[in-house]
Image (cartoon, rainbow, N blue to C red):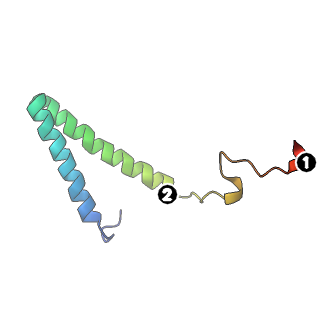
Amino acid sequence: MNPDAPGLWARVLVRALVVTAAGVMALGFLGPGEAVLVAALTALTFVLLWLRARALGRGRTPPSPERSRGTEPPRSPDED
């Protein structure tokens, strides 16, 4: 994560607000112990998603258009 990336601090702020909101809602519905658990699990989710995106972005090449998954090469009318 580059600290000079555009929009980085806005994304961090929004994620912090989401974690705080989840904790406050859990506090209102469940109680203080559960609120801490919900906030921690929400923050952990953001960290795990960031790590996954970072791992997938490193060392992968985009798929070739000729070999995309789920599509077959065009068949000639003689093959039927």
Identity of the residue drawn at 70% across and 53% down: 67
- Residue 25 placed where, x, y %? 13, 37
Left or right position of 14 against 79: left
Q: Which residue is mark 1?
A: 78
Under mark 2, the amino acid is Gly
Is 13 rendered above or below residue 2?
above
Disc 1 marks which amino acid? Asp
For the N terminus, give its image quadrant: bottom left
Q: Quadrant of the C terminus?
A: top right
Evaluate if marks 2 and 1 touch, with contact meaning CB atoms under 8 Å apart: no
What is the crowding at mark 2: few (fewer than 14 residues within 10 Å), some, or many (at least 20)? few
The answer to whether residue 40 is left or right of residue 53 is left
Name the one closer to the observer, 54 or 21.
21
Q: Disc 2 vs disc 1: which is toward the camera? A: 1
Label total for image: 2
The picture quadrant where one finds residue 48 is top left
Q: Secondary structure at mark 1?
A: helix
- The disc placed on residue 57 is 2
With respect to residue 52, does 39 lie above or below? above
N-terminal-most mark, 2 or 1: 2
Residue 40 in picture, x, y percent from top left = 22, 39
Element type at mark 2: helix
- Residue found at the very far right of the displayed protein: 78
- x then y, percent, for residue 50: 37, 51
Instruction: Identify which residue is drawn at 29% across, 64% down.
Output: 8
Indicate left or right for 28 with 13 as reference. Answer: left
Category of crowding for the residue at label 1, using alpha-carbon neighbours closer than 10 angstroms: few (below 14), some (14–19), many (at least 20): few
Q: Nearer the viewer, residue 35 or 1?
A: 35
Task: Give the residue displayed 43% in from the left and 48% down from the top.
Answer: 52
Q: Could you tell me residue 38's position as x and y percent?
A: 21, 35
Work out how far the residue at label 2 is from the one at label 1, CA to CA, in angstroms: 42 Å
Q: Which mark is residue 15?
A: none
